[in-house]
Image (cartoon, grey):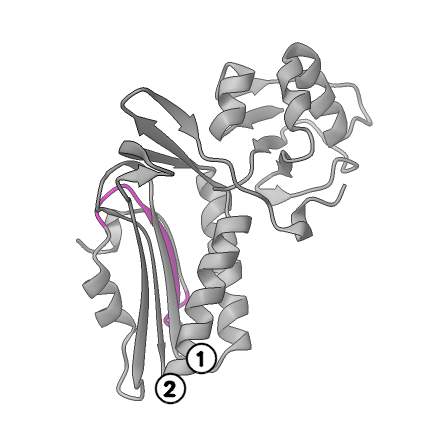
Amino acid sequence: MRVLFFGMVKDLAGCSADTLELREGSKLGDVFDYYAARNPKLREFDASIVLARNEEFAPRSTGVADGDEIAFLPPVSGGRDRYTHLIADEDTGNFFALTREAIDTDEIKTELLRGEDGAVVVFDGVVRNNTKGRSTRYLDYECYEGMAVKMMAQIGREIAAAHSIGRIALVHRLGRMEIGESSVVIVVTAPHRRPAFDAAHEAIDRLKKLVPIWKKEYFADGEVWVEGEWDDSVVNR
């Protein structure tokens, strides 16, 4: 099976990917135990590392088989061809994407807006120049891309079904970002403002705890993976 490591777990494991053979009947917990035996510092983060099997969250009791792709996930912290991954719902107009280019917020608003909409709410998360008084030089984002865009689509569709909105878009940028650049943009259109505000608020809160995207912050005197936390719904073992 193929094993992937992201964010600070990649640093702890000493690699971004590995291949592993286990005996028949093995479970995800055995995969974790194997790498924790090789890299004991992983045990210190046992409670916060979530595992995924074939791009879906899974408890450690889940069985594994030849050909599986297993991922170790630490807590999260132009035209459409510019997106590295894109899920677009043609029937609703919602879309969810990852990109390594600057996010064009105005283009997204134009694509989502319809004549019946009376409100457009935009959440634009930008890179700030400090954290707790420590001067920030730039940020770098990485993610488990295939799984991340699927989770973004799941979140967006659930929010659209729960709120009286028109359309919703979630777009996250990856790679290096300078101070003042947008890292994540959420756009919601709706006939009325309140549902649009509520939907945008819920979307960023859920994205931060459910989508496997990690942020590394670079300072003049060092660098650090920004710690976050998983939503309770994915940490049950």
Q: Identify the residue at horizontal 48%, vertical 50% (top origin).
A: 208
**Residue 154 picture location, percent across and down:** 53, 59
Magenta region includes residue 96? yes
Q: Which mark is residue 55?
A: none
- Report the magenta residues as a range: 89-102
- Main SS of the magenta segment? loop
The crowding category of the residue bearing disc 1, from other C-alpha atoms within 10 Å (few below 14, some 14 to 19, many at least 20), is: many
Q: Secondary structure at mark 1?
A: helix
- Furthest residue toward left: 78
Q: Identify the residue at horizontal 50%, vertical 29% (top origin).
A: 6
Residue in the foreground of this view, choosing between 115 and 202: 202
- Are discs 1 and 2 less than 8 Å apart at CB? yes
Find the distance from the CA under tag 1 to the CA under tag 2: 6 Å
Q: Which residue is mark 1?
A: 195
Task: Judge left or right: residue 47 versus residue 17.
Answer: right
**Residue 129 picture location, percent across and down:** 26, 40
Q: Is residue 234 visible?
A: yes
Check the image and report above or below for 139 versus 230.
above
Q: Which mark is residue 192?
A: 2
**Residue 132 picture location, percent across and down:** 38, 38
Q: Is residue 21 visible?
A: no
Magenta region includes residue 178? no
Disc 2 residue type (three-letter): His
